[in-house]
Amino acid sequence: MKPQPSPLAYVPFVSVENMMRLTNAIGPETLMTELAGYIEEDFKRWPEFDKTPRVASHSRDGVIELMPTADATNYGFKYVNGHPKNMREGYQTVTAFGVLSSVANGYPVLLTEMTVLTALRTAATSALVGKYLAPKGASVMAMIGNGAQCEFQALAFRALCGITTLRLYDIDASATDKAAANLVAQGFDVVKCGSAMEAVEGAHIITTCTADKQYATILTDNLVGAGVHINAIGGDCPGKTELHRDILLRSSIFVEYPPQTRIEGEIQQLDEDHAVTELWQVMRGEAPGRTDARQITLFDSVGFAIEDFSALRYIHDRIAGSDYFTKLDMLADPDDPRDLFGMVMRAA
């Protein structure tokens, strides 16, 4: 199941075109269900990984980050940006690519686009966490923020948690219209809402996913009733939040990697010693998830490198023996490993 060092003198590359082909061939819901299985498997062996908060370079306009991790067999990293202004200029807010390499010899065994793949893995992670934390019988989800991630989240939550009805709200009505059209076509019952207050009415799960890089109050305390699960996926850098602090104080908070989440997540609003639960411990049965029907559970999601590692591992396995990649000439392969110069000269 784990990628092994390759004797081939090429690196498989999955382009955006091939990622889309692969997603449509498998089906988005099936792919995200399978991917969630890889993520869960890796979370359950969390102590085996090297872990560090992502390396971020912040600028006036956004952030560029590297997200590395490794186990005893493979090393993986993702390059990803976050530039909220991009949408106004006709660009994606987030773009990414990733590499998986063999620890045994350091050779890359996969290079892939990760703009589409990050959307898939983020949604798969959210819905996987929902399996552990959402109230029993949840069928209605509010989606506040109807941008690029919205439809992926909806499909993943249907596949893994049984969501059938979506209540959509965005400050940009055209984003809601876009999402509603896409999701009705996917068979959802969709309600377009005029405010966050209207969106959360009757919702069992509340997903917040906005792009502005600022402290914001997308949800106020009075909007969150007992028993809901909050999937807070929009806070992902210092100085950016979506939830009023009082919501956090009423919630059982679950995180990926506390040293990173305390810098970038909703809990940057709280004292450093405020108690949170790590999700890998819940998945291993070492800590409780939802314990009460009236409990408010909060997934303070910022994305962590192990989720990207799982996605890289999944794609590597899925493309084996297929035509969903091209062969890149990235590995110098002289007949004599010591004679790199001779190889260059003979190429003349």
Image (cartoon, rainbow, N blue to C red):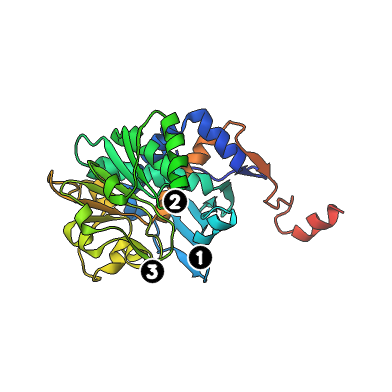
The label number, if any, that marks residue 62 in the structure image: 1
Residue 135 relative to residue 184: left or right: left
Disc 2 or 1, which lies upstream in sequence? 1
**Residue occupied by mark 2:** 172
Look at the image and tell me in which quarter the C terminus lies: bottom right
Q: Where on the picture, by quarter, is residue 154?
A: top left
Task: Tell me the distance, in whole angstroms, between the alpha carbons under discs 2 and 3.
Answer: 22 Å
**Residue occupied by mark 3:** 239
Most foreground residue, 227 or 119: 227
Q: Nearer the viewer, mark 2 or mark 3?
A: 2
**Residue type beneath disc 1:** Gly
Across and down, in percent, residue 252 comes to 19, 55
Residue 291 relative to residue 346: left or right: left
Across and down, in percent, residue 44 comes to 31, 46
Q: Where on the picture, by quarter, is residue 337?
A: bottom right
Element type at marker 3?
loop
**Residue type beneath disc 3:** Gly
Numbered circles on residues, count? 3
